[in-house]
Amino acid sequence: MIDKNFRGNAYVVKGDQVLCEYVSGFADLPNEIPNTIETRFASASAGKKCAASEKIRGYNS
């Protein structure tokens, strides 16, 4: 399900059921601090596309 080269976190929920919880790689590579499920990532403008997509999907429903 998850590509073996993926580094980061994946947390997928449907209703109350957790479908996928995956953590890999480092939150801070130079200091070798591993990612945790609570690791926060700077997404800059990446989230805008997701939010816009969800708004469009909701509008078209």
Image (tube, rainbow, N blue to C red):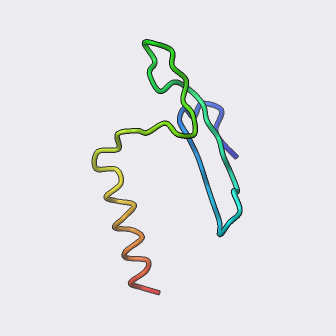
Q: Residue furthest bottom?
A: 61
Q: Nearer the viewer, residue 61 or 27?
A: 27
Q: Nearer the viewer, residue 39 or 52?
A: 39
Q: How many marks?
A: 0
Q: Residue 16, percent across and down? A: 68, 66
The residue under the point 37% across, 76% down is 56
- The residue under the point 38% across, 84% down is 59
Q: Is residue 12 left or right of residue 50?
A: right
Q: Is residue 3 above or below residue 28?
A: below
- Give how far across and how far down residue 41 sits, in percent: 41, 38
Identify the image quadrant of residue 6: top right
Query: Is 1 located above or below residue 36 in the figure?
Result: below
Q: Up-down: is 17 above or below 40?
A: below
> Does residue 46 appear left or right of residue 29 in this picture?
left
Residue 18 screen position, x and y as percent: 69, 57
Residue at 65% from the left image edge and 66% from the top image edge:
14
Query: Residue 4, image x and y in percent?
Result: 65, 32
